[in-house]
Amino acid sequence: MPGLTTEALEQAREEESLRETVSRLERQLADAKRKTDKLVEATFAGAKDAFLIAGPMVPVQSPPIDPRVHTAEVALWDLGDWQGAKQTPSYNSGIMRERVMSYCERAVRITEIQRADHPVRDCCIVFGGDMVEGLFNFATQPHEIDATIFGQYASVSRLLIDVVRFALANYENVSVVAEWGNHGRIGSKRDAVPRSDNVDRMCFEFARSMLAGEDRLTWEDCPEDIQRVEIGNYRAIVIHGDEIGRNGFASPDTIAAWVTRQQSGAYPWGFRDVYCHHYHQHGERALPNGLGSIYFTGSTESDNRYAGVSMAATAIPSQRLNFVDPEAGRVTANYKIWL
């Protein structure tokens, strides 16, 4: 460049080099954005394909209306600890689905027995957590699954949808109370991830959004780690069960003491019963007040080597079904459904 000083020439070269660098970075940014867009598109397409493979979602037809004026009760389906994608000699994602849908069929058959005496128009579904197996709780976990987080998200979300739709086909109104568990945790306990950023909750949210058009369904989000069940005058809380005790394990006595403290004012909402999961055992523990109970719910899983080795405990797959009198505010009957 004639007429320019050495200093001006140097400055011009630096400006040209800067322009080239900016241009190169802009191209790299555009390439990265295109790649990201493609990844996002592939993720959504994969989720859509997973649901299409499982079958179309046809509209749910309402069941016949029960015109009887007799006091009605409400069916309470308590499901949890599906451990979706856990693989053992007798359990995997396919067996999980078979057992869960078998529960739905049996719960409706028992409901029909109850209906022979009085109306059972509505259903409250409790999802108690550990719907997915996850990847981050045990060192061996990635070797004991038949699907990674993405596969678990797709299959469990679809199963949640199918359970709710089955209930909608057999009850006039359905409500869902969903609690997330420790197996849905993202990363280790030391990672700076909010507890409510949980794969269980993500599955709940996807299923909830897919069913948003069902006007006979009530389903709220679950940002807190204790959920509330309110059926007329009946009030209960839902916990997963890992919230109590050291390393997520507590004896029934310890759980009962914790519940009593909650009823004494530690939890700012009065309740009668507690629905507890996590332990893969079906049971009922009376509370010291003589009124309420802790209802423990089983699991669909079988051959849990961790429980057998670490706690010398095992359980036959089962889930819980209760019936509630909304006027008296109490459970009238409860069933253990073997799976």
Image (tube, grey):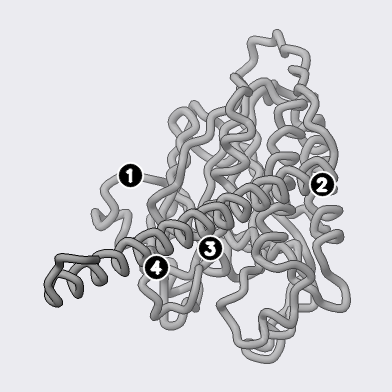
Give the CA distance from mark 4 to mark 2: 33 Å
The mark lying in front, picked from 4 and 3, is: 4
The mark lying in front, picked from 4 and 1, is: 4
**4 or 3: tag closer to the N-terminus:** 3
Q: In which quarter of the image is residue 106?
A: top right
**2 or 1: tag closer to the N-terminus:** 2
Q: In this view, does 276 lie to the left or right of 195?
A: right
- Residue 318 vs 47, above or below: the answer is below
Q: What residue type is labelled 2?
A: Met
- Residue 126 vs 308, above or below: the answer is above
Q: Residue 101 carries which label?
A: 2
Give the CA distance from mark 4 to mark 3: 15 Å
Foreground pick, 177 / 250: 177
Q: Quadrant of the C terminus?
A: bottom right
Q: In which quarter of the image is residue 266?
A: bottom left
Q: What element carries label 4?
A: loop
